[in-house]
Image (cartoon, rainbow, N blue to C red):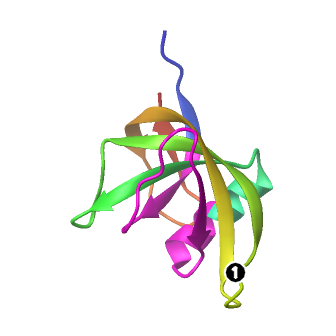
Amino acid sequence: MTETLKLPVLPLADSVVLPGMVVPVRLDEPEIQAAVDAANSVDRKVLVVPRLDGRYAAVGTVAVLEQVGRLPSGEKAAVVRGEGRAQIGSGVTGPGARSGWR
């Protein structure tokens, strides 16, 4: 059985998050900041997706936003914990937009 949910998409250009991983993510791009803000306002879940050649991958990881703060360097960052794999269905672009996954 598949379940469809809508989650903010947190795109990563230089790393991949797998289930079980805990990863700090710099909030240095508006798209990343918008996904974290949207997750913070609802259930703290995001869909972390690798961005390959300017396009989103077809599979991502559902992750929980564990903490938002600053790195020792002073940069804003969030810590996400991967929970499970997800296949991306359809999406809507824009700040805080959510993508369907199953």
Residue 72 place in picture, x, y as percent: 71, 85
Residue 33 place in picture, x, y as percent: 61, 72
Q: Nearer the viewer, residue 37 or 28?
A: 28
The answer to whether 56 is drawn above or below residue 30 in the figure is: above
- The amino acid pointed to by label 1 is Leu
Q: Is residue 54 left or right of residue 77?
A: left
The answer to whether 14 is drawn above or below residue 3 in the figure is: below
Residue that lies at the very extreme toward the left in this rendered image: 53
In the image, the segment drawn in magenta is 7-35
The answer to whether 86 is drawn above or below residue 82 in the figure is: above
Tell me the residue at 71%/90% (across/down). 74
Which quadrant of the view contains residue 25? bottom right
Residue 90 place in picture, x, y as percent: 39, 40
Q: Is residue 80 magenta?
A: no
Which quadrant of the view contains residue 38? bottom right
Which quadrant of the view contains residue 52? bottom left
Residue marked by disc 1: 71
